[in-house]
Amino acid sequence: MTLLKNIRQNSSIKLITIIFITITMLIPLSMVENTIRERSGLRLDAISSIAQRWGGEQIISAPVLAVPYSEKIIETPAPVNGWIPPENTHQKKKITYIHHMAYLLADNTSISTKMDTEVRYTGIYKVPVYTTKTAIKGHFIKQDLENLNQRYKNLNWSQAKLLLPISDARNIKSISSVKFARSDIDFVPPSLAYCFNSIEAAVDLSDIVNSDLDFSLTISHAGSSQINFLPLSRISDITLKSDWSSPGFNGAYLPLRRTISDTGFTSKWRILGLNRSFGQMWHDNNINNVNFENSQFGASLYQPADIYQQNIRSVKYAALFIALTFMVFFLFEIFFNLNIHPIQYFFNGGAISTFYLLLLALSEHLHFSIAYLISSIAIVTLMSGYSMTILKQKSRGILIGVITAIIYSFLYFIIQSEQNSLLFGAIGFFSALSTIMYLTRNIDWYNVKPASKLE
């Protein structure tokens, strides 16, 4: 009984030791993960740096008509002892004019944008940027102009402005004169604080307010990361063409039609006024009810599984892979009556942890697949050669190398399977657990006797 008890204690102690080492390996793994996040943060800083100099997210939309008007406020003198003085006395009514701005959207707009992309570098980090060429045309209809005139009195049509919403004037590379009501008018910086960031063109509509007004212009932007559109018309037809092969569509509306290939993509939207969260006209007093942000939509320069996403994805499986590798070594102890020292488990765990650091460092300079291949070959060779000694036979070390290579091959497959990585990971680990359970089904764990000493 005493001998059996000692055997049980030794087996338990060995398993507890392996579990402890596995948990301890989480410390270097967490350090590697923090390093990955730090390097990813540096990449975001690089993107921000490029955006400040080249251009950030750009907004493209149809122009908006802004017409000033004045509201007459008459202040009657307060009664004195219940008596209101007559108007012909020195206490006269006070008349004040408050200036407002009324805004009107176009009836129909067609926007066609061609986006050419390129890659800029900041140190070792590459950032996709773009330049756009956009043609905008549309018209304001007579009925909307009449409705605006009826809703807001005293409109000063001679001081009307055609506003073109922008994100940052510094990122405009070129812009044509706007053809508006059979005239060519240049855009200039805004003269007033409007309800959105814009440039303006002064238009005198005092003689043509009772007719449809057509407009057209072309504009070129420089930007990065994402391009956005605003549906500022009753019907907005928008076409975006680009040579970027992996777009991400986001915002309030998805494309009505889209085609994506290795040479680029084309997407088309049609947004109706009923789809928006704001109306066809408004004034500056109710600007809080006009939420443009909720109606933005567009496309981003999506980078599928960039190196930091892939590194983070790989390190998330590290603890399970260490546990699986340690289980393989423990089975070698059982089947071949070996005694692997805890320090040797530490060394193997350290080798596995080093793989992720090596992968991160190499993937910043090489293609991820090549970096993964080099890192995995290095670690498989290291562990296989080391195992030839601690497992007492070259064939056993080679077997460890084969098993480790299979594990890393499976990990690479999971990393590359963006949409199905969880499914394949679950199936893989279920298969590994099933294999281990099958191989150990006949072991009497109460009578497992490790070797008494290193051979």
Image (tube, rainbow, N blue to C red):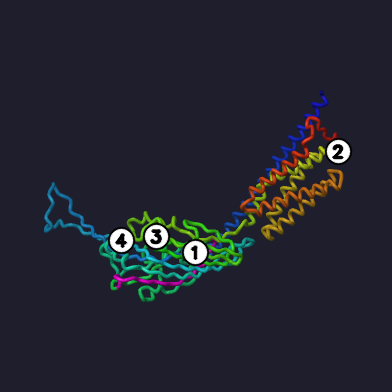
- Which residue position holds label 4? 100
Location of residue 320 in the rendering, given as x and y in whole percent from the top left corner: 69, 44
Question: Which of labels 2 and 1 is toward the front?
Answer: 1
- Which residue position holds label 1? 268
Question: Between disc 1 and disc 3, whose residue precedes?
Answer: 1
Question: Between disc 4 and disc 2, whose residue precedes?
Answer: 4
Majority secondary structure of magenta residues: strand
318 displayed left or right of 179: right
The span shown in magenta is 208-225
Q: Amino acid at mark 3?
A: Gly
Question: Between disc 2 and disc 1, whose residue precedes?
Answer: 1
- Which residue position holds label 3? 273
Say if mark 3 contacts mark 4, CB within 8 Å.
no
Residues at marks 2 and 3, CA–CA distance in whole angstroms:
81 Å
Q: Is residue 78 magenta?
A: no
Question: Between disc 3 and disc 4, whose residue precedes?
Answer: 4
Q: Residue at x 78, y 37 (%)?
A: 440
Residues at marks 1 and 4, CA–CA distance in whole angstroms:
36 Å
Identify whether 427 is placed above or below 104.
Answer: above
> Foreground: 258 or 191?
258
Question: Between disc 2 and disc 3, whose residue precedes?
Answer: 3
Q: Amino acid at mark 4?
A: His
Question: Which of labels 3 and 4 is toward the front?
Answer: 3
Query: On the rendered image, what quadrant is the N terminus found in?
Result: top right
Q: Tag 3: Cα neighbours inside 10 Å, few (<14), some, or many (≥20)?
A: some
- Which residue position holds label 2? 454
Q: Residue at x 69, y 40 (%)?
A: 23
Based on the displayed image, in which of its 4 quarters is residue 392 positioned?
top right
Identify whether 213 is placed above or below 102.
Answer: below
Q: Is residue 217 magenta?
A: yes
Say if mark 1 contacts mark 4, CB within 8 Å.
no
Q: Is residue 373 visible?
A: yes
